[in-house]
Image (cartoon, grey):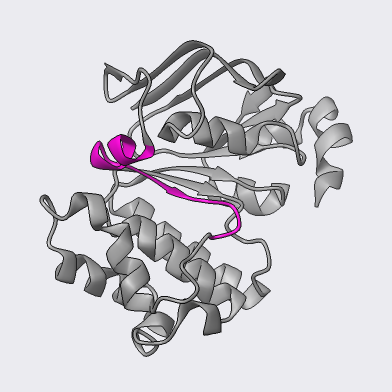
Amino acid sequence: MLELQNVVVDHGTLRALWDVSIDVGIGERIGLLGANGAGKSTTMGAIVGLYPVTSGAITYEGRALGPHTAAESMASGIALVPEGRRLFLQMSVLENLSMGAYGARGRIDVARQTEKVFALFPALAGKRHQLAGELSGGQQQMLAVGRALMSAPRLLLLDEPFIGVAPLLVEEILLALQVISDGGVTMILVEQNIHRALDFVSRAYVIENGRIVLAGDRESLLGDPDFSSKFLGLE
């Protein structure tokens, strides 16, 4: 479904990604693991068109993604849940959800999609007219995921979705993500809690200093001495 081949991304004079290659099949749940500053968010940003690719190629559903915008990515079925949520805090829950459907109104039933989000996250249904800024951290994260789902994506990118979320709500969000995945949505999860990530994804890539240094399923990664010594301390 998605392939990054030898992708290089520069932030001005700083090279953020060096030769990143990953492959994601339809319906997979893939992890992207690594420390802060390793290049995880830049990789997600390159996929959705927030950061231009200096060299290399990104292919999505058999089509090369040349220079593209986030709006074009959303129209093609890619949605990002950004790190830090980035909600419209002075807008209501419903208004935030509506913004998630902004570029997709011509191809989805917005009211039906809204009710799907409320079915996944019942805590939001009773707060539909409440300001996003008045929600708890966990409820705000539910809203950020719900907003991304409003465009009916086929590929969902989740960038550190559990930061500042209470453990009980983390479990609730993970259960919702499982339902979304079972519905056929492909996912890439960026997460620093290694065991949490590996419990959810089918396999993962490990990025360090802008390069993919390891890849494999849970068993192969946890059994790799290099992975254990470098990355299990991230939690």
Q: Where is 197 relative to 135, above or below? A: above
Q: Is residue 156 magenta?
A: no
Q: Which residue is depicted at the point 66% across and 73% down?
A: 167
Residue 100 makes an appearance in the image: yes
Instruction: Give left or right: position of 67 versus 228.
Output: left
> Is residue 60 or residue 228 the one in the foreground?
60
Instruction: Give left or right: position of 136 versus 180.
Output: right
Instruction: Give left or right: position of 200 versus 187.
Output: right
Q: Residue 226: x percent and y percent? A: 84, 26
> Is residue 55 or residue 6 the one in the foreground?
55
Q: Where is 138 relative to 101, above or below? A: below
Residue 217 makes an appearance in the image: no
> Which region of the structure is painted magenta?
70-85
> How many badges with numbers are in the image?
0
Q: Residue 22: x percent and y percent? A: 52, 22
Q: Which residue is depicted at the point 37% across and 62% down?
A: 147
Q: Residue 229: x percent and y percent? A: 89, 34
Q: Which residue is depicted at the point 42% across and 35% down?
A: 48
Q: Is residue 83 magenta?
A: yes
Q: Where is 1 relative to 96, above or below? A: above
Residue 105 location, quadrant = bottom left
Q: Where is 151 relative to 118, above or below? A: above
Residue 99 location, quadrant = bottom left
